[in-house]
Image (cartoon, rainbow, N blue to C red):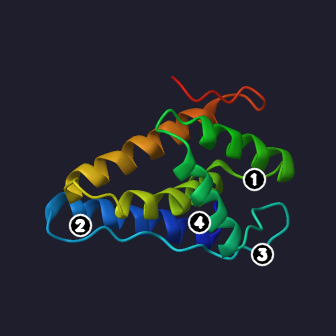
Amino acid sequence: MAPRQTIRGVAGFCAVALIAGSAPAVAMQCPTPQKLSRPGVLQETAVQTNEMSAYLADGNDSGDHAALIIEDLRRRYPSVRNAEVTNYLVTAYCPLVARLTGLSEAEKQARMDRFASQVDRMLAAPTGKTQSNG
């Protein structure tokens, strides 16, 4: 069963998706980093999440940076659950998308949806075989 904080983070992201889909005038709201305390889960701080956000910003939409982050997190936290990794990466990536100019809220949400799907595909790959394309 997923930790309560992860469920809240994912539920918050889903709520943003529903709001963005039904009322395009509503500005995108991003999830905030959640402190998780049980052993074996992500222990990343808000500062580390912001650093990952900057790292993702330096990349492109190919997912190469996300794949490297996933591999690093799996190495450092072998028992991390996929939902926690997804929550972490969505939390890091969302501010980048929210700040984009020239895109409608629906286009921003579509970009977030693509990213989350891409992360899910990467996480489904066997450990050590994370791929960014596909």
The residue beneath circle 3 is 37
The residue beneath circle 4 is 6
Residue in the image at 62% along x and 41% along y? 65
Give the residue type that dot 4 points to: Thr
- Give 90 or 40, whichever is nearer the viewer: 90
Query: Is 89 displayed left or right of 10 in the figure?
Result: right
Residue in the image at 70% along x and 40% along y? 68
The residue beneath circle 1 is 80
Question: On the image, which quarter does residue 101 sit in?
Answer: bottom left
Give the residue type that dot 2 points to: Ile
| Above or below, 34 relative to 75 | below
The residue beneath circle 2 is 19
Quarter of the image where the N terminus is located: bottom right
Query: Is 85 displayed left or right of 31 in the figure?
Result: right
**Which of the two discs, 2 and 4, labels the residue nearer the N terminus?**
4
Q: CA distance from mark 2 to mark 3?
A: 30 Å
